[in-house]
Image (cartoon, grey):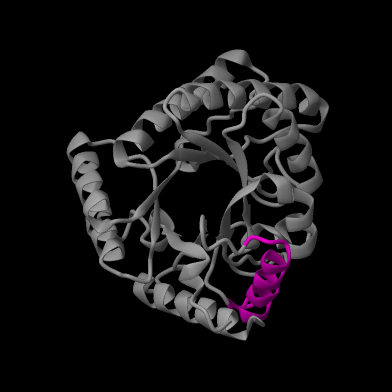
């Protein structure tokens, strides 16, 4: 494409993935990313200390960044499940998601993203009803603040083993929620397509009416290989599924499906993290190179 990718997408990154908490102070990370004009958006997550939240909010406001809020760590860390068949457990998950809406609002985000919890085959239908209940309640609360709720589609049997996907099941769920909640959408992630045994074309065409946000990244799906599962290693990682060619295919599909919107660009964030001692800054730079190359190869 001759035109800049920034014309059609707000390019972002997931802060806690690009700069893992064990290696980076969150405020230093946010400032570094906000000072990099490659980025138009930043996805942040829970900040437990009020002083950190306030400082982060000031930086994000000054930087003219699109702020997104990922509530996934609020669920994954303590093992909370929004589709828990135990009602008390479901309510715990709902409570942290409602708190996430408040924190997202404070940080300047216009919504939150989350993921479904794990499931068991024998209780799958009951879990589905529980997830509908949680999602509707969170959507209703967010709607009162003029905010949006997004569910990220994950694998169902490899790593996260989440209730939602694969893509056809995600489409069913999104249609059910959209029947009563207009402030709901889906996040699709290139790094999850190999983990659900699906292609960019299949996922994006199946979920087209419900997609509101994109992630890109990589995965290793060969059993026994390093970084197997939903670990988001860098593009081109040994034995991995995605590199420049797969990102180019992804770009071709979203272009064909009409997602290049200069008037109201979608957020497209990369979810890539350093693996076992790798340098986060080198991984960030390498990911930008893959994006730039794939976009340059995309036909006008």
Q: Residue at x 38, y 78 (%)?
A: 282
> Is 248 in the magenta?
yes
- Does residue 26 appear to the left or right of 86 in the view shown? left
- Reply above or below: 118 against 83: below
- Rendered location of residue 109, percent (x, y): 38, 42
Query: Is residue 93 shown above or below 201?
Result: above
| Depth order, front residue of 166/120 | 166
Q: Quadrant of residue 161?
A: top right
Q: Position of residue 49 (x, y in %)?
A: 23, 36
Residue lying at 72% horizontally and 46% vertically, measured from the top left: 209
Q: Quadrant of residue 295?
A: bottom right
Residue at left 52%, top 63%?
262
Percent across and percent down for residue 39 are 38, 66
Please provide percent x and percent y for residue 93: 52, 25
| Picture quadrant of residue 54 | top left
User: Range of the magenta residues?
Assistant: 236-259
Q: Is residue 44 magenta?
A: no
């Amino acid at each position: 494409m001759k035109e800049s990718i920034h014309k059609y997408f707000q390019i972002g990154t997931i802060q806690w993935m690009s700069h893992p908490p064990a290696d980076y102070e969150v405020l230093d990370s946010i400032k570094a990313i906000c000072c990099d004009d490659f980025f138009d958006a930043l996805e942040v997550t829970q900040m437990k200390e009020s002083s950190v939240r306030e400082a982060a909010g000031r930086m994000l406001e000054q930087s003219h960044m699109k702020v997104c809020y990922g509530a996934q760590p609020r669920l994954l860390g303590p093992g909370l499940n929004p589709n828990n068949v135990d009602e008390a457990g479901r309510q715990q998950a709902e409570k942290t998601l409602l708190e996430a809406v408040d924190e997202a609002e404070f940080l300047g985000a216009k919504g939150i993203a989350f993921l479904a919890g794990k499931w068991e085959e024998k209780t799958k239908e009951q879990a589905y009803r529980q997830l509908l209940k949680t999602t509707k309640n969170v959507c209703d609360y967010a709607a009162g603040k003029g905010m949006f709720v997004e569910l990220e589609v994950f694998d169902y049997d490899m790593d996260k083993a989440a209730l939602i996907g694969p893509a056809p099941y995600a489409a069913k769920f999104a249609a059910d929620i959209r029947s009563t909640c207009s402030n709901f959408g889906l996040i699709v992630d290139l790094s999850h397509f190999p983990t659900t045994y699906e292609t960019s074309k299949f996922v994006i065409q199946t979920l087209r009416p419900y997609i509101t946000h994109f992630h890109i990244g990589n995965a290793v799906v060969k059993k026994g290989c390093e970084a197997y599962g939903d670990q988001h290693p860098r593009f081109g990682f040994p034995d991995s599924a995605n590199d420049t060619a797969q990102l180019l295919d992804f770009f071709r599909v979203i272009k064909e499906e009409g997602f290049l919107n200069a008037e109201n660009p979608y957020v497209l964030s990369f979810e890539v993290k350093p693996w076992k001692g790798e340098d986060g800054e080198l991984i960030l730079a390498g990911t930008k190179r893959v994006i730039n190359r794939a976009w340059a190869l995309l036909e006008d």
